[in-house]
Amino acid sequence: MAKRVVFRSISLLTKAKLSETTKKREEKVSILCKNCVLSVWEFCKEDSNRVIFSLKVGLAVLLVSLLILCQTPYRVFGANIIWSILTVAIMFEYTVGATFNRGFNRAIGSLLAGVIAVAVAELALRTGRVAEPIIIGFSIFIVGAVTSFMKLWPSLVPYEYGFRVILFTYCLIIISGYRMGNPIRTAMDRLYSIAIGGIVAVVVNVLVFPIWAGEQLHKELVSSFASVADALEECVRKYLEDDGSDHPELTKTVMDDFPDEPAYKKCRSTLNSSAKLESLANSAKWEPPHGRFQHFFYPWSEYVKVGAVLRYCAYEVMAIHGVLHSEIQAPYNLRVAFQKEIQDAATDAAELVRCLGKDICNMRRSLKTLVLKKVHSSTERLQRAIDVHSYLLTSEPTDTSSKPQSTLSHTLSSAFSNLSNHMAELDNKLLGQNPDPQSQPLDSYHETMRKQSRRLYSWPSREVDTFEEEGCFSSDCIPRMRALETTATLSLATFTSLLIEFVARLDHLVEAVDQLSKMAKFKQEAL
């Protein structure tokens, strides 16, 4: 009896453990399923056209498959109708223009391959049974080498898919014709099947919720304008609000994705949009007039040029972002001293970029004279402020009696008085963390306070600590420390010069947008 009780208890424990294990596995599986569903849902929410495209491909393949599933069309076309399914799967693209481009390459490539295959097959038949396979094999080698070489030619790269079609269509037609004994009949059946698949793909893509490459290109360019403007304002705002108390290490800055800077991420994606814009422009050239783009020969290449000039401006925003997260930082009081001029220049420049994006979005042409004058005037005020108070950007001892004593220099001079206040705040924080002042020596405590306060207003902190630890503040070290302080203050000059350069590049952007509006025949805005 005792053994049975022991066995029962062991079996119950085993079952309990198994049930817990199965529950944990079920929970993990349910969590994975939820995560997969959420990721798919987010992917579809980003662009609903992805779902539409997938359904359209399924519909086109279904329509072609009915020719095989139904008995009557299968008797007419036979097994060669499978080429229609292959044509739909290969030719159907995301946008209408890309589908037309693929269809053109597919049609020309199949037609040329069929003509060459029929000619070579007839020539091989007249040479006899012995020489026929030799001629066919040699022709396959020649066609493969020539098409592979031609698709590498720079001017023929857009037709690379057509050369691939020539190669595999020729090989399949001539080999199957050699075995079946009637190459002309085989070539005609294959061409009919390819034509049916191409027609179905084009009809479904154009008539069922069409996705136009021109519309996609238009939206992509407009969103890039908004991204650059938002990123510029975000960088300037953070630069002026940052008091220098929390700067990450350089390794963290380089590897960080900056989750608190969404506008910067969009601007970074704008820099990588060159290939996308060119692809959409090439596809849009194949599309007929549609939607808001109602005239033939629409200047899609001008969209690519405007995007290139916009990326030229976005490079400056990336450089400004680099100064924002660099280890060499100007004192906070110096940045605040020029806050109004920097803020006005950045705001006006961002407003001009948004105005250009809105004009492209609404397809209208308006004069930018007033906005440009406002941007230039705010930038000139920033330049004058930097020029008048340039002596603040160097640590060399100069006679400032002749310099204008404005509120700007008064604001900067208050930095040194704030040092003692900040040290008192650090004292209170450290005393709050360590209520027993006897737990650490008094000298090391003040040493730590001095180093922490010095890090907020000097660069680099490692050099300062080394000088303090070695006790070498002699006459030889003073020029070196002044050079380090000058380097820190010149960080502000770098930031402002990049901002001014951004404004200078806006003139090219305005000219590019004006050229696009002329060639695309945008509506002239009433004065």
Image: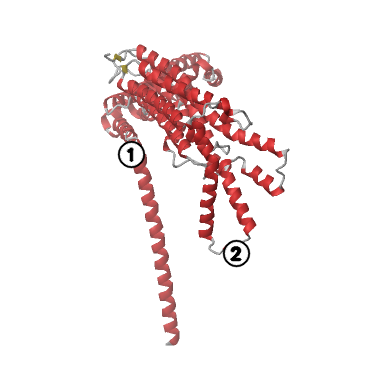
Classify mark 1: residues with Cα within 10 Å, few (<14), some (14-19) or many (20+). few
Q: For this view, does 401 lie left or right of residue 14?
A: right
Image height check: is 471 above or below 505? below
User: In this rendering, would 511 be left or right of 452?
Assistant: left
- Give the residue at x 52% y 32%: 409
Q: Nearer the viewer, residue 111 or 38?
A: 38
Foreground residue among 106 and 206: 206
Identify whether 35 is placed above or below 339.
below
Say which residue appears at 55% left-offset and 45% top-offset: 419
Image disc number at residue 439: 2
Q: Residue furthest front?
A: 401
- In the image, 452: left or right of 21? right
Circle 1 SS class: helix
Seen from the viewer's position, the closer of residues 147 and 334 is: 334
Disc 1: which residue: 45
Q: Secondary structure at mark 2?
A: helix
Mark 2: which amino acid? Ser
